[in-house]
Image: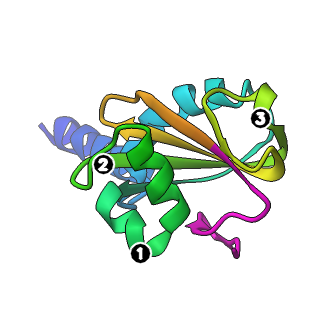
Amino acid sequence: MTCVVAALTLAACDSARSDLGTSSSPCFVALPTANGAVHGAGRLVGVRLFTVGSLRRQAPHAYADATSAGAHSSDHVCLVAYEGRFTAPAIQKPRGRPAGKFAVVIVAYPSTRLLTTVIFRRVPLRFGHFLLGI
């Protein structure tokens, strides 16, 4: 009996550590879609979960891009940011600048449908531990 309790306790600790403990953790299901949108280019900067409506004040350009791709204010989206060299012809569903240092892939959540990929000179949101200014 003691062994069973110890095993369950260790399993619970292990599963708690595997969760990032952030509200954006569910968006890691969007990584395969996002990686495909940039064709594996660049370095992953971070992942964020938003409602489309909350993007209106926090990232107006991303809000406009998400809504023009068919998302509604109450929908959830995952924003996945990559740093590298990006050009519109080299990514899927491009919007924004024709070329830039950052690509933010907007993916519908939970469906993981690609909405758009936006190219920026600088990312307008905080991703991970980095604050990337406008």
In the rendered view, would you say 58 is above or below 83?
below
Residue 5: % across, % down: 17, 43
Q: Is 74 placed left or right of 126 in the picture?
A: left
The earlier-in-sequence mark between 2 and 1 is: 1
Q: Verify whether residue 123 appears in magenta.
A: yes
The amino acid sitting under disc 3 is: Ala
Verify CB contact (< 8 Å) between mark 3 and mark 2. Answer: no
* Pointer 1 local density, CA inside 10 Å: few below 14, some 14–19, many at least 20: few
Badge 1 element:
helix
In the rendered view, would you say 128 is above or below 90?
below
Mark pair 1, 3: CA separation: 26 Å
- Identity of the residue drawn at 22% across and 40% down: 8
The earlier-in-sequence mark between 1 and 3 is: 1
Please give the residue where the numbered disc 2 appears in the rendered image. 76
Q: Is 38 placed left or right of 21 in the picture?
A: right
Q: Quadrant of the N terminus?
A: top left
In the rendered view, would you say 11 is above or below 97?
above
- Identity of the residue drawn at 35% across and 38% down: 70
* Res 57 label: 1
Badge 3 element:
helix
Q: Is residue 67 visible?
A: yes
> Which quarter of the picture shows residue 4?
top left
Verify CB contact (< 8 Å) between mark 2 and mark 1. Answer: no
Residue 45: % across, % down: 68, 54
* Magenta-colored span: 118-134
- Identity of the residue drawn at 33% across and 43% down: 71
Foreground mark, 2 or 1, reads: 1
Badge 2 element:
strand
Q: Quadrant of the C terminus?
A: bottom right
